[in-house]
């Protein structure tokens, strides 16, 4: 099946070329970082985790979101997800690769990652995070590729594939739970020190990840005519809507705990994010944008009469992705490190080199995803006797 990645339309090669150019541009900034150190970033003594770790955290959620397809398909035999299941697993592969790459660029010197493998420390959450991420990557590669190969040859996948799919469901919960423990295990950071951090991570993952998947599927349907089925799209949209409701509910629990109990350590980070603290208001517009978009997206996702219209669905999904990224890919980490243990405010915001290096990582993930999805879609179209250039179905 790999040969399908080596031939394609000008649009396919143009997409890969564009992503490669972005990756090369970002690689130049990464070389600059290797030469000068992490001093070129906005990180320092008071904010030791920055934009790289924030994106790592968000993408772990995107990787874990594949379970929202795997669980209904394998556990409950919901065959409507048949056309999307491999796409979800391949998205997880691209997301995990980006996660690992963000860890590498955050270390400053790549050789430092060898310390985790050559000198393992089981009491370290980072050690277990690396272990579960690598395991999840292997599971999705094996299950996704073997299932696609079996479909191509018109065969039933081996029984062990279904067993590994079951394992991947549990593993998906573990990768984001361990990532949450990285945060919740920091007793000096009150915004992270909450028993429901793992639950919040999973809730946000199960709405934002499938939302990104569904947006990409709708884009592919528009560009190629590959249709995963209206029922599958609507069902996944329902899952996303309810997961977002749970995500918002968990955040409201945090607000109640902090303000009703009048706990200064928990109030300060939230105040910094939404109203500013000691005159520092950099994050206020971002967080209120996240709040408005997060609540507003439910208007488009909950009512079935609205959700089943493609333009409204796309708008709602875009609002959800932006809101979840502003909250989890920016606000969570910055809020957790503010104020410092000395009760001062150290303003952090990503620098241009940080943005560009992050673009490099996203471009790498985009290339991996483009190649994998092309293979998956062409195999299914070939087997079903369809035509990728067919006119996209109308609503």
Image (cartoon, rainbow, N blue to C red):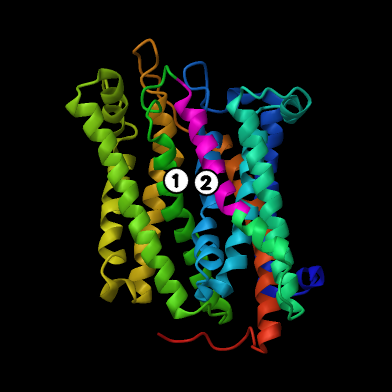
Residue at which label 1 appears = 202
Q: State whether residue 6 appears in this view.
A: yes
**Dot 2: element:** helix
Q: Which quarter shows the C terminus?
A: bottom left
- Which segment is the magenta one? 167-186
Label at residue 260: none
Label 1–label 2 contact, CB within 8 A:
yes
Question: Which callout, 1 or 2, points at the residue further toward the start of the chain?
Answer: 2
Q: In the orientation shown, which residue stands out farthest toward the top? A: 342
Q: Which quarter shows the N terminus?
A: bottom right
**Dot 1: element:** helix
The percent coordinates of residue 29 (x first, y second) are 65, 37
For disc 2, the neighbor class at 10 Å (few under 14, some 14 to 19, many from 20) is some
Residue at which label 2 appears = 173
| Foreground residue among 144 and 324 | 144
For the residues labelled 1 and 2, the Cα–Cα distance comes to: 7 Å
Q: Is residue 286 magenta?
A: no
The image shows residue 340, relative to residue 53, as above or below, that is: above
Q: Residue at x 44, y 73 (%)?
A: 233
In the figure, is residue 228 to the left or right of 271?
A: right
Main SS, magenta region, reads helix
- How many numbered marks appear? 2
The percent coordinates of residue 362 (x first, y second) are 60, 50
The percent coordinates of residue 300 (x first, y second) are 29, 66
For disc 1, the neighbor class at 10 Å (few under 14, some 14 to 19, many from 20) is many
Residue 301 placement: quadrant: bottom left
In the figure, is residue 255 to the left or right of 320?
A: left
Q: Is residue 183 magenta?
A: yes
């Amino acid at each position: 099946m790999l040969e399908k990645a080596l031939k394609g339309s000008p649009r396919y090669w143009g997409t890969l070329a564009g992503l490669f150019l972005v990756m090369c541009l970002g690689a130049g900034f990464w070389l600059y970082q290797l030469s000068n150190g992490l001093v070129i970033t906005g990180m320092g003594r008071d904010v030791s985790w920055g934009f790289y770790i924030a994106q790592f955290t968000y993408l772990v959620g995107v990787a874990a979101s594949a379970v929202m397809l795997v669980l209904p398909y394998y556990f409950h035999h919901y065959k409507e997800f048949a056309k999307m299941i491999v796409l979800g697993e391949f998205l997880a592969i691209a997301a995990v690769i980006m996660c690992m790459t963000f860890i590498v660029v955050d270390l400053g010197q790549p050789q430092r990652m060898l310390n985790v493998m050559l000198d393992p420390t089981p009491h370290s959450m980072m050690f277990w995070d690396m272990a579960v991420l690598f395991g999840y990557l292997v599971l999705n590669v094996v299950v996704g590729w073997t299932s696609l190969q079996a479909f191509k040859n018109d065969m039933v996948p081996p029984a062990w594939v279904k067993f590994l799919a079951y394992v991947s469901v549990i593993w998906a919960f573990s990768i984001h739970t361990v990532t949450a423990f990285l945060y919740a295990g920091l007793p000096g950071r009150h915004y992270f020190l909450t028993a429901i951090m793992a639950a919040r991570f999973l809730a946000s993952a199960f709405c934002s990840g499938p939302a990104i998947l569904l947006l990409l599927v709708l884009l592919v349907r528009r560009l190629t005519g590959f249709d995963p089925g209206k029922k599958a799209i609507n069902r996944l949209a329902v899952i996303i809507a309810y997961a977002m409701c749970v995500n918002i509910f968990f955040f409201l629990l945090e607000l109640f705990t902090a303000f009703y109990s009048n706990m200064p350590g928990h109030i300060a980070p939230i105040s910094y994010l939404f109203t500013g603290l000691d005159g520092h208001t950099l994050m206020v517009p971002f967080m209120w944008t996240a709040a408005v978009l997060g609540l507003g997206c439910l208007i488009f996702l909950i009512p079935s009469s609205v959700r089943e219209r493609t333009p409204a669905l796309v708008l709602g999904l875009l609002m959800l992705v932006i809101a979840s990224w502003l909250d989890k890919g920016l606000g969570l980490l910055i809020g957790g490190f503010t104020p410092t243990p000395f009760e001062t405010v150290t303003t952090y915001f990503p620098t241009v080199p940080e943005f560009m290096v992050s673009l490099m990582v996203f471009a790498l993930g985009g290339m991996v995803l483009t190649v994998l999805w092309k293979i998956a879609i062409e195999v299914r179209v070939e087997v079903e006797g369809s035509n990728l250039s067919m006119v996209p179905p109308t609503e």
